[in-house]
Amino acid sequence: MTTILPTRVFIHGLESSSQGKKGVFFKKIYPDMIIETFSGGFDKRMLKLNAVLNEKDDLVIVGSSYGGLMATVFACRNLSNVRKLILLAPALNYMPVDFYPEKSLDIPVCIYHGNRDEVIPHIPVHKIAIKIFSNLIWNLVDDDHSLNNTTFSLNWDILLC
């Protein structure tokens, strides 16, 4: 029996790129994973993300920091195309003022956030996450914003299915 894998996507953070630690890590382990470099403001990044993922479905999206915000907004606007979100210290506290979903998203969402994150504080992100996601697994881990200790030790084969 052949298992059909989802379309896997990684979205880096604001000051990173596809060549950052996480992007290189995912490309090495999952060469078919979609990993692009995003630059500019939020709207420009979202235009590119929409173009990259146009007509793709069964998406499992990993979003890191600002990429987590982008993944969340994309999922809200394209819910039928997204299977799951894995968000690493997502910058949900930077959600555009005019954007909040009318109802909570019921797709599986797994968030990892460091308890020592001084860039994106976990308490406001958690409050926003429980409003947006009805099928949420929240993991507060002993790490900082980069989540380097956490990211590279997770079982990605299970998370990305």
Image (tube, helix red, strand yellow):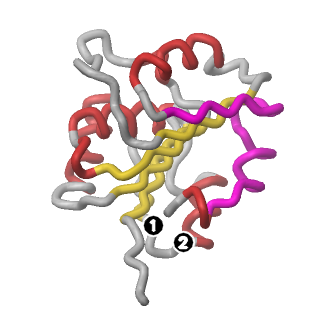
Structural crowding at the residue carrying mark 1, measured as other residues with C-alpha within 10 Å and reported as few (<14), some (14–19) or many (≥20): some
Q: Which mark is residue 96?
A: none
Residue type pointed to by label 1: Met
Is disc 2 in contact with disc 1, using a CB cutoff of under 8 Å?
Answer: yes
Q: What residue does disc 2 label?
A: 30
Residue 39 versus residue 102: which sits nearer the camera?
A: 102
Q: Which residues are magenta?
A: 136-156
| Quarter holding residue 100 | top left
In the figure, is residue 143 to the left or right of 50? right
Which of the two residues, 49 or 111, is positioned nearer the viewer here? 111
| Residue at mark 2 to residue at mark 1: CA–CA distance | 5 Å
Residue 33: x and y in percent read 45, 67
Answer with the quarter of the image where residue 43 lies.
top left
Residue 45 vs 62, above or below: the answer is above
Is 72 included in the stretch rendered in magenta? no
Can you say whether 12 is above or below 4 in the image? above
Q: Is residue 161 above or below residue 5?
A: above
22 to 139, vertically: above or below: below
Q: Position of residue 86 (x, y in %)?
A: 52, 45
Dividing the picture into quadrants, the one containing residue 79 is top left
Q: Residues within 10 Å of mark 2 (few under 14, many from 20)?
A: some
Q: Position of residue 28 (x, y in %)?
A: 61, 72
Whether residue 5 is visible to the viewer of this picture, yes or no, is yes
**Mark seen at residue 33:** 1
| Outermost residue toward the front in this view | 1
User: SS for tag 2?
Assistant: loop
Residue located at (55% from left, 40% from top): 110
Queried whether the magenta region covers residue 150, the answer comes back as yes
- Relative side of 66 to 28, left or right: left
Q: If the image is split into quadrants, where does the N terminus sit?
A: bottom left
